Image (cartoon, rainbow, N blue to C red):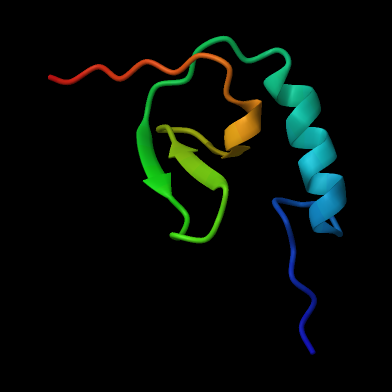
Amino acid sequence: MKQQRYSGYKTKKLAEKAMSNILNDVKEVRGSLFKMSDKDEEIMLKSDEDFYILKYNEIFFAAVNVS
C-alpha cells in the first residue's frame, strides 16, 4: 500500500501541527477558497504559490472581496 504524504510530512497529525504553527504567523492570504466536502470541517485556500488547509475553528476573522 502506498503511503500517503501530507505536503512533505509523514503523517496528517505532523502536517496539521506544522500548519498550526505557520497559521499563527499568517495574517493575510489571498486566493481561491474551496470547501473540502459537505461533511468536513475544513476548507482549502489556494494562492498562486501555495495552499493552506484550515479548520473552521482556526479561522478567527474572514473577509471576502468580490471583484
In percent of width and height, residue 49 lies at 48, 33
Side of 27 relative to 12 (left or right): left
In percent of width and height, residue 26 lies at 62, 15
Side of 40 relative to 19 (left or right): left
Q: Which quarter of the figure is the N terminus placed in?
A: bottom right
Residue 5 sits above or below residue 23 on the image: below
- Number of marks present in the image shown: 0
Classify residue 27 by image quadrant: top right
Residue 30 sits above or below residue 20 on the image: above
Residue 39 sits above or below residue 16 on the image: below
Side of 26 relative to 49 (left or right): right
Residue positioned 50% across, 13% down in the render: 28
> Which of 6/57 is in front?
57
Side of 5 relative to 40 (left or right): right
Residue positioned 79% across, 56% down in the render: 12
Residue 36 sits above or below residue 53 on the image: below
Residue positioned 37% across, 15% down in the render: 63
In percent of width and height, residue 43 lies at 50, 43
Q: Which quarter of the figure is the C terminus placed in?
A: top left
In percent of width and height, residue 23 lies at 69, 22
Classify residue 54 by image quadrant: top right
Residue positioned 85% across, 51% down in the render: 13
> Which of 8/52 is in front?
52
